Image (cartoon, helix red, strand yellow):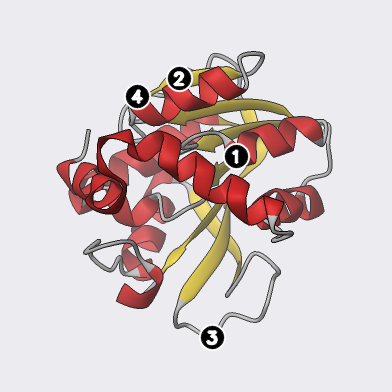
Amino acid sequence: MSTLWRRIATEDAGEDYARAYAERFRRLAARGVDVHGEAALVAQLLPPPARVLDGGCGTGRIAVRLAELGYEVVGSDVDASMVAVARDDAPHLEWHVADLAAPEPVTEPVDLVLLAGNVLPLVDRGDLPAVGRHLVRQLAPGGRVLAGFGLDADHLPGDCPVLDLGLVDTAFSEAGLVSTGRWSSWDRDAFTGEGYVVATWAAA
């Protein structure tokens, strides 16, 4: 597991960080906060039924919502503690402990790969080309990648280093992915080039 991710995950929540992470979103939902913006955008871009890989799925919040909406969902995350919580909460779904920079354990192609929750900035920069290649191998013809992440320190957890969007575009382009859109939020607000980006790429 990335030492950067481990440090950021545990600095506020301690060793039970995975369960604390899941509980934080449950409390938000209980207060009436909409915590399903990512799944709502997936539904706008690719109505169900479709097959989705939730890469960097964490404790499964988005994958569970997508399954409720009628998608066939596979969740994967490099953090075994996060995946354990997801399995406990939704044992009927398919979960894997896997690194985005290594071949995913998904046997059937997917129509969309979702990378939400600042997954990409937590990838070692040298691994971005491998991530791009492995994402392409997961996609069915015409499949897409949808990712959202912060572009500055205010939109990233802990001391996570800022990821240049250009590095992602270059790595994904070399892997055979074409940029097809970007916004500044999961609500598809116009992209300003600052703060936060939600972007899509399609298999060439």
Q: Amino acid at mark 3?
A: Thr
Which sits earlier in the primary sequence, circle 1 or circle 2? 1
> Is there CB contact under 8 Å for labels 4 and 3?
no
- Give the residue drawn at x 54%, y 18%: 88
Q: Amino acid at mark 4?
A: Ala
Tell me the CA gap for discs 1 and 2: 15 Å
Tell me the CA gap for discs 3 and 2: 35 Å
Q: Is residue 40 visible?
A: yes
Q: Quadrant of residue 83?
A: top left
Q: Nearer the viewer, mark 1 or mark 2?
A: 1
Quadrant into which the N terminus falls: top left
> Is there CB contact under 8 Å for labels 4 and 2?
no
Tell me the CA gap for discs 1 and 4: 15 Å
**189 and 104: which one is in front?**
189
Q: Residues within 10 Å of mark 2 (few under 14, many from 20)?
A: many
Which residue is denoted by mark 2 in the rendering?
96
**46 and 62: which one is in front?**
62
Which residue is denoted by mark 4 in the rendering?
80
Which sits earlier in the primary sequence, circle 1 or circle 3? 1
